[in-house]
Amino acid sequence: MSEHYWTARAMQQQGSRFYRALGQALEASDAVNRRLIYQTWPEACWDFYQRGLRLAEVE
């Protein structure tokens, strides 16, 4: 599965209400909007990307 899938999944499972919604947006986004999300919230996306890697390892 793609990197943004695991990042979005971590946001939805482990984030606050805002990050759960952002994770849903990330999961549904096309490449242009995905890039916009990554550019707007780079630190948060990196944090949830790393969490997503851990989720992927477990599954």
Image (tube, rainbow, N blue to C red):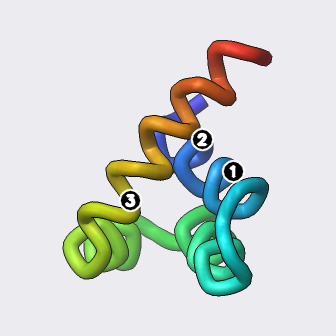
The residue depicted at 30 percent of the width and 67 percent of the height is 38
* Distance Cα–Cα, label 2 vs label 3: 11 Å
Q: Secondary structure at mark 3?
A: helix
Camera-nearest residue between 39 and 35: 39
Image coordinates of residue 23 in percent, x first then y, are 62, 68
Q: Which quadrant holds residue 37?
A: bottom left
> Badge 3 is on which residue?
45
Q: Secondary structure at mark 2?
A: helix
Camera-nearest residue between 47 and 9: 47
Residue type at numbered disc 1: Arg
Residue type at numbered disc 2: Trp
Residue type at numbered disc 3: Cys
Q: Which disc is residue 9 wearing? A: 1
Return the disc, 2 or 3, that comes first in the chain's sequence.
Answer: 2
| Residue 48 position (above or below residue 59) | below
Task: Give the quadrant of the C terminus.
Answer: top right
Crowd around label 2: few <14 · some 14–19 · many ≥20 (10 Å): many
User: Horizontally, is 39 left or right of 31 in the view?
Assistant: left
Discs 2, 1 touching: Cβ within 8 Å: yes
Image coordinates of residue 27 in percent, x first then y, are 62, 63
Q: Which disc is residue 52 wearing? A: none
